[in-house]
Image (cartoon, rainbow, N blue to C red):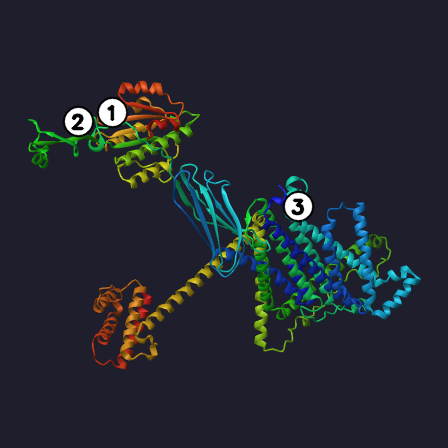
Amino acid sequence: MLVTLILIAAALRDDFALSLVYLLVGVFAVGAWWSRRALAQVVHERSAETHAFLGEKVKVGLRIRNAGWLPVAWLDVRDSLPVALASPAVFRRVTTLSARGQASFEYELEARKRGYYPLGPLFLSSGDLLGLGDALTRQGDVQHLTVYPRIVAFGRVSMPASAPQGVLRHSQPIFEDPARVFGKRDYVAGDSLRRVDWKSSAAVGRLQVRLFEPSMSQEVLIVLDMDGDHYHYHSRIDATELGVVIAASFANWIIENKQACGLLVRGRDPLGVNGLPQPVPPRKDKAHLMRLLETLARVEMTQGGPPLPLQIQHVRTGLAWGTTLLVITGQADDALLHELYQARRAGQHAVLILSGPGAPVAEVRHKAGFYGIVVRSVYSERDLEQWRR
Amino acid sequence: MGLSSFPAEVHLNERIFRRISYALVGLMMVCAAHTLSVLVGHIFINWPVAWLPAMMGFIAFERLFTYPRTRGLLLFSTEWLKGVFTEWIALALILRLVVGVWHGLPAFSEQLFTLARSFTEFFLLPEFIFVLVIAFITWMLTGAFASLLDEMGLDRALIALDVPTLDSGVPHPRARLSALVVSLGSALVIFTALVRVNLRDMFLAGAQPVFLDLSALSGGGGSTLLYFLFGLALLSQGHFITLHTQWSLARVRIAPGVARGWITYSVIFFALVLAIVSVLPTRYSLGMFTALGALLDLVVRLAGFLVQLLIILVVLIINLPAMLFGRQPQQQTQPGLPPEIPAFDPGQLAPLETGGLPWLEALRALVSWVVLLAVVGVALVSFVRQHHSLWQALAQFPAGRWVMRLWRWLRGASKSFGDGLTRAVSAGLERWRVRRAAVSALPGGMSLRRLDARQRIRFFYLALVRRGSERGLARGPAQTPLEYAATLERALPESDSDIATLTDEFIKARYSRQPVLEEEASLVRRLWNRIRNALRRA
């Protein structure tokens, strides 16, 4: 049509056709310029919590602002969401932005499953008013939300430990703690003078000695096996998730009891070096618990990789004498049992927890009994009730 | 999934779209009728066609009003025929009444007497038949627009979802709407062009075509331009409702202000385009179009010459057997002589008599050429962007590859030129800002001319420090002037004495109470100029 109009203008020596040419091309050129320019000046901001506990509702705020003077006639806002947290897996709105105008949106995510989820990317699409060109799209950034795993509050857990000078009571008097006085008695020959309570002796008029409560410190390294091949193939997803719940619950219980807890995971960590989770050495404060839970929130099932016994061997050499190795897995082969036996010989303890249905409990228990290793079986989350308060 | 399941905003937006679109269609019909009336008035002077736009506007709005009521009827069914027949009886009577009143009430009363004599004589009036035909075309076109707008709505999309084969193979309604707008617009452009030719003299007296000198907006130009403007606005509305339907089907929540914002921004957008179009040169482009027109004439004449030559050859071949048998050819023309090419009239290329200054006219002509070339360039780029497949097909040929290389080179060159220009402007602005900051940092923020000799020396020294830092010889926070001078001297050994003298003068001006003479300030200025040149070379 443009060529026709130019030819008409030339044939008739008339400026009317030229005005029409200007109008048509102007509409196209101004439209293309407007839409590009306007979209380039749109800025966006997403505000959301970065961490959430299971079952919490997380509010996500989106603020879209037009930083320029050109209005945006239509703006298609699409935020991609994780399927596990939202249905449908996209938040989509259409709005218009006046010059220097802004629009705010809010949506809610439900932390239904532990994990490390991307929020976004945010796509902003716009175009010209006549639809002469293709819609333009800008891609925004991605934020992440960590959903912590489920924690079962434990109360009655008996775990072998032999590290002295802790805060937990111990049945063997060899581990008496001078900081835990539980009574006094008369002095008998052979008592250490360091046990004499001079103030009480002065008050009573005869020598009194302090009685100390035996105690232990329970340093635990939780070893979580997330190798899918080590679980029954029918229930490997549920079994590994159950393993995460067990690990998180034990970590919580240990640190609540002011004991040190470390973590070694054989799995995949999206934030780990080369996708491998880094071993977390035992510590005993709340911040450390959050660190453990964050790692447990992120880890994913893997297949293959360095063998678990080898990883345990590398890590346990740096652990203190008397540390308990709490190994959570779907099955235990001879190599693993042998490694745990070596740990026992080195003065450490080992507890094996078989997670999920389909685990060969009887067979493992038989073999582990030979090595002197305690074996527990957790078929489902209901079985965790045995350790509840 | 029914219409009732959609939120109220969706229905509101659809209602706004329909009202605006119907108004635009009505206005387009009025504009089209106006252009046609100008052409009719141009050919038949005695026809009072001034009422034609209003009448066609009435027909268009009547059709838009009745369309929703008749769209559910089956085409050519009894109900449909009854409705249309009744509608057209009423319309024909109204139109006849208006045509009768054109020439005044006395003339109409005379015509009413003819009704008593002959029914056919009253109704078979040429003017009335013409108006009736135009009214029918308007009615049909308006119906076509209404039908297309109806197809873009959510209602039709829902039906298409249920019956997917209903619209298969048919172009999208928006594409058909564009085609309809452009087709009708093309006809109006031709009408407007015809108004600019003295058709009566051409056809009645057999004279050469004479082009009338009309302004862009007169002779139907204004109404045709308005038609395109309203047409583009209608396409914009069509784009909105297409997107709106897509969003609604995807259950996307649409903000309540989108429909109204679309209208507001469309008005702003078209106002902006009109403002740009109105300031672009058109009058001064006529010299350019004269040249193009002359070239077009030359091409047409050359084509005519070639056709004549071909005819002679054909005649010669036909007559050749007859000539061989000794008969005279029937054709009286001399086949050996080709026809003359009509002489090229350079007078057509004469510049326009605008009465302005020659250089100003040349500048305006130059501007118009640049604008037109830019317009063609923009159109070409847009075309190429929209037709990637064509571009790829072209790339398979050597010429196409060469064009692509040239295009890439042009893009690269223009980009690097633009980047370079941006860098140069940014650097210049930055330098200006720094200089301004340096001047304002001087006591009282005075300009250089107002400074006394002592302050000028300090200013040149600060300029030395600033320029030195730009060249990677920044003065350290703990460096004394003499230490900094040593640094500069190491970097610029050829200017060591200048640097030393300038530094000494600065120390004297800054840290002593000795009087500073104008000659010393002038000397420092000369030294600074030499050091600056040395810094540039470094």
Judging by the rendered image, the residue that carries numbered circle 3 is B156
> Would residue A202 be found to the left or right of residue B404 on screen?
left
Q: CA distance from mark 2 to mark 3?
A: 87 Å
Is disc 2 in the same subunit as disc 3? no
| Mark 3 vs mark 1: in front | 3
The location of residue B395, given as percent across then percent down, is 56, 49
Quadrant including the C terminus of chain B: bottom left
> Would residue B39 be found to the left or right of residue B367 on screen?
right
Q: Residue at x 68, y 72 (%)?
A: B347
| Mark 1 vs mark 2: in front | 2
Count every numbered label the image shows and give the total.
3
Q: Quadrant of residue B206?
A: bottom right
Q: Quadrant of residue B519?
A: bottom left
> Would residue A81 be found to the left or right of residue B241 on screen?
left
Mark 3 crowdedness (10 Å alpha carbons): few <14, some 14-19, many ≥20: some
Q: Secondary structure at mark 3?
A: helix
Residue type highlighted by circle 1: Gln
What chain letter is assigned to the residue under label 3?
B
Depicted A215 relative to depicted A285: above or below: above
* Pick the front one: B263 or B144: B263
* Pick the front one: B166 or A245: A245
The location of residue A281, given as percent across then percent down, is 27, 36
- Residue B130 visible to the viewer: no
Depicted B71 relative to depicted B511: above or below: above
Q: Residue furthest front?
A: A204
Judging by the rendered image, the residue that carries numbered circle 1 is A342
What numbered label is drawn on residue B440? none
- Residue B408 visible to the viewer: yes
Residue type highlighted by circle 2: Pro
